[in-house]
Amino acid sequence: MITKFELFESLNIGEPKFYDYVICSTDSPEIKEFVSNHIGQITRVFHEGETKPVGYDDFMVEYGRENIPEKLNTFYFLHGNHSGWRGFKREDIIYWSKDKEDLEKIIQKKLAINRFDL
């Protein structure tokens, strides 16, 4: 039996930071599958004690309007020239990395497992 181990050298190091790539989770059933199977990028971090607009969470994650299925548009919002943003709490960020490739490997493995019901 051959076992392959992959090293993710930059996965979940420290705390998520501005410009890190992320895979998130949410309690919202409408978008749960999308955010857990797509990579976003942190575009804003609100630190403890910092004033943030009402309804904003600690991390603003950009998915890009072109990547969001139309049926999910109502669960995202526009902010200035940016679109496809969604706020997440720290506990909603499952994986983060400065290297997008690490997260792409996780998504690929997850999709393969789901496809073959492993």
Image (spheres, grey):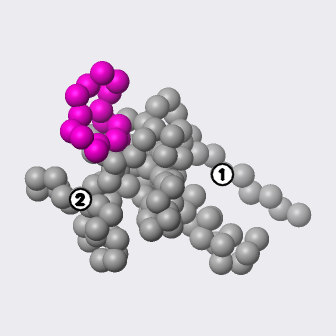
Q: What residue type is labelled 1?
A: Glu
x and y percentages locating residue 58 in the rendered image = 35, 37
Query: Mark 1: which secondary structure?
Result: loop
Observer-side mark, 1 or 2, equals 2
Label 1 crowd (10 A; few <14 / some 14-19 / many >=20): few
In percent of the image, x 16 and y 53: which residue is there? 79
- 93 to the left or right of 41: right
Instruction: Provide the major secondary structure of the magenta segment.
Output: loop
Task: Give how far across and how far down residue 86 sits, in percent.
Answer: 32, 53
Q: Classify mark 2: helix, strand or loop.
A: strand
Q: Give the range drawn in magenta.
A: 45-59
Q: Residue furthest right?
A: 1
Q: Which residue lies furthest to the top in this view?
A: 49
For residue 6, which numbered disc appears in the image?
A: 1
Residue drawn at x 30%, y 32% is 46
Residue 55 among those drawn in magenta: yes
Nearer to me, 102 or 114: 114
Q: Can residue 71 be seen in this view?
A: yes
Relative vertical location of residue 67 with respect to residue 63 in this rendering, above or below: below
Residue 55, placed above or below residue 68? above
Quickly name the residue at label 2: 77
